[in-house]
Every structure is written in C-alpha cells, then in structure tokens.
Image (tube, rainbow, N blue to C red):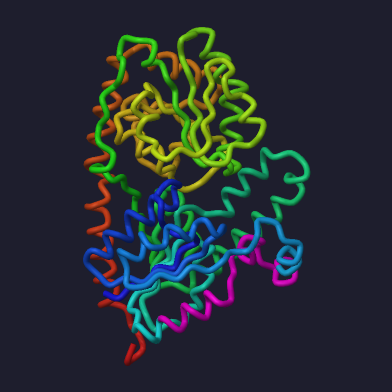
Amino acid sequence: MRILFVLPQIPYPPESGGRIVTWNMLRRFADKHECWVTCLYHHPGELSALPVVREQVREIAAFRAGPRLSPWRFLRSLLENKPYKAVRFRNAKMAAYIQEIIRRERIEVIHAQNFYAAQYVTGHEPCLRVHYKENIEGLVMARYAEIAGPPWSWTLPLEAWRTLNFERRLLSRFHHILSISNIETEVLQHWSTGPQITYCPPGVDLEAHPLLPIAYKNGAAGLNVLFAGTMSYPPNDRAARWLLDEIWPLVYPVCQRATLSIVGHGPRPWLLERNGKQGVEVTGSVPDMRPYYEKAAVVVLPLQIGGGVKLKLLEAMAFGRPVVSTPIGAEGLDLKRGREIEIAESAVDFAKRIVELLKDVERREQFVNNARKMLERDHNWDQLVTAQIANYEQWLKDAELPAGS
C-alpha cells in the first residue's frame, strides 16, 4: 500500500501520548508499506526530529501551526463558525501539499490523525480515507467547562459545542473511523450515519518497556510515587494541583520517608514552587523516563478531566509499576479494578490506595503480574498494528474508488 499519514505534530520523539501512538504505528506500517508523512510543527526546535522520521518513510513535510493565541485567528473562527483549534491548525500550504502529493505519488490510503489533521481531508480524494481519533476533543472541553472558573466557564461551553459539531461533520469525509477508546467508540457509533466505526485499542512497546526490578523493596528509597505527563497540558496541570493540595498531604504524614516525583515538560510556576517541599520533586523535561520508573514504587494518574486513553498508564504497567488512577484517568480501557489497577475518586480514597501499595510489597507485585499479562494479551503494538494493516488492505480492496486512482 501507498499510505499518506496526515499528522497534527512531528511524530518523534515518542514522549507525549499522541507521539507514542503515532510513532509506534508509523514505523510498523513503514516496515511493510510505502509511507509518506505531512505534519504540523509548533516550534522550530521540533524540526531537529525530522531526520529520524525521514529514515522510516519515503518523504516527510512539516508546516508551521498557528500560535497558541492569535486575535486574528480567533476572529476568523467566529466568522467561519469553526472551533479556534481548527483555525489555529489550518495551514493553506499544507492543504495544497496534501492534494499535490496524492496525485504525484498515487496515494492509496490517507490516514488522518485527530481532528486537527482530519480537516485537511476534503472527502473527494480518490483513495481510501481513514480517520484515527485518539480522543473526542469537544468532550474534553465540555468536561473542563464544568469545573473551570471564570472566564473559561463563560467561553468553553460554546467552544465545546462548536468543536463537537465540527468533529461530527468531519466524520462524513471518511470511509472508516478508528477510535482508541472503547467508550468514545460508542459515542462515535451513535453519531455516525455513514463511515464504519472501529474500536482500535492502543498498544505499548513491550520490548522498549521491559519489566523493571522493584528497587529497594524493604528500604526508604522504595517509597517513591511518580506522576508523569506533559505538565503544560491543562488536565495534567489540574491533576498535579489536586495531587499536591489534597492527596499528598494525606500520604506524607503517614509515610514520612515517601517521596513524590512529578516529571514532564512545561510545569507552571506554581508547580515549580512546590519542588523540594514535603518530599516533592518537580523535574520538568527529562531526557529519559526510565530512571524515574526504576525508583518508583507506585505510579499515579489523578486526572479529573480528559478523554481518550492515557498511554502513560500502559507504559507504567509495562515497566512493572502498579497504578492508582481516577476513573477518568483509566477511561477507555477494559481494566479490572483491584486486580490490574486501583481506582479512586475522592482524595481520601486516592491517598489510602497509595499508602496501601507503598506498605505492601506483595500486593504491588500482584498488580504488576496481572497487568503485564493483560498487556501481552490485549495491548501489544506488534499484534495490534499487524491487525490494523490487514484491515487497511481489506478496506482498500472493498472500497469503491474512482477509476484510475
């Protein structure tokens, strides 16, 4: 197959959830098929990753996304009745390039990742069109609107409504929609009157994420708790605040030798101020996450808003670390409470689950063994992408495409 991947960001390095999904998928497709990539970038420094991607594919072209805040783009979004992010991530040169490369390279399949990229597909391209959704963006906004204070509580409900409508309209441009969340798959099936909706669970690279020894089982250094993610992402920033303000004050007095590591790009000033207090470590970006997983006894995912599936959760499990999460943090995955993951809703219950795991090595190991078996069975990237490729091949055969395409 000749496949064009239309992506909202450069897919390397695989540090954030979106890049983890895309990079693992792209390089496995590229092992067996001819692949092209067109994508957006946000900062010039990201362009240094292009040579790595270029080694995997026939061609890659990156185009600049709009700035995070732009009065002109905001006005355009109002005039065009489109969500702001759709206008922000629209680049006319990228749109023209996509149509040109489809003709020049006789592309057979377009794979558009998330709604920022899906808008570049017109629905008239003479090839199989697949839309891969990591989350329903409008649902994330709607959730945030419910708990945000002014001024976001005034503006976000309208933006969430516009985004949901935009995402619905985009579905009709595609032959197939893939969703990595079992819950959002049901939502999309309710929306869709045309394209086929398929649940496509996310994976984890089990070779790159081997079981790590549980370090210092009986020592103080084995009492580390880890929260990892892009801290500039509002749901993670809010989760860190809840963790530090309401959960950790209940853990620290009980386990005074315990430490908490908050690791990820872009921590806000308020979060950096908490570094060094009550056993808290705030690192910002790090070149390698493995040392932080090696010293962690427990990984936490205290998300109160969000959507899609949290890939960091699967990675933590693959490394052999038990996870305590909110229901939203574990949403979209078929995980067994009390066996593969601990789920807590209140700060008191969340802290209780952390303390229990810090104190009980045997219980931690039970979670590790159960979760690893589940990952090997249901979330192995090699198996999942092999099945996805087979689907694309069959869908391409079944598609009624214009003659000469």
Residue 243 drawn at (x, y percent): 56, 25
Report whether 54 appears left or right of 118. Answer: left
Report whether 128 appears left or right of 82. Answer: left
Q: Residue furthest bottom?
A: 404
Report whether 387 appears left or right of 185. Answer: left
Q: Residue at x 57, y 41 (%)?
A: 266
Instruction: Report if residue 82 lies within the magenta region.
Output: yes
Q: Quadrant of residue 299?
A: top left
Residue 271 drawn at (x, y percent): 62, 30
| Quadrant (top left/top right/bottom left/bottom right) for the N terminus | bottom left
Q: Residue at x 54, y 17 (%)?
A: 348
Residue 195 drawn at (x, y percent): 42, 69
Q: How many marks?
A: 0
Q: Is residue 283 visible?
A: yes
Q: Is residue 194 visible?
A: no
What span is colored magenta in the figure? 77-101
Q: Choose between 245 and 127: the one closer to the eye.
A: 245
Q: Residue at x 63, y 37 (%)?
A: 268
Q: Is residue 97 above or below residue 300?
A: below
Q: Is residue 140 above or below residue 361?
A: below
Q: Quadrant of residue 338?
A: top left
| Quadrant (top left/top right/bottom left/bottom right) for the C terminus | bottom left
Residue 236 drawn at (x, y percent): 55, 38
Instruction: Report if residue 392 lies within the magenta region.
Output: no
Q: Choose between 153 and 85: the one closer to the eye.
A: 85
Report whether 52 appears left or right of 43. Answer: left
Q: Is residue 222 above or below residue 237?
A: above
Q: Choose between 359 and 64: the one closer to the eye.
A: 64
Q: Majority secondary structure of the magenta segment?
A: helix
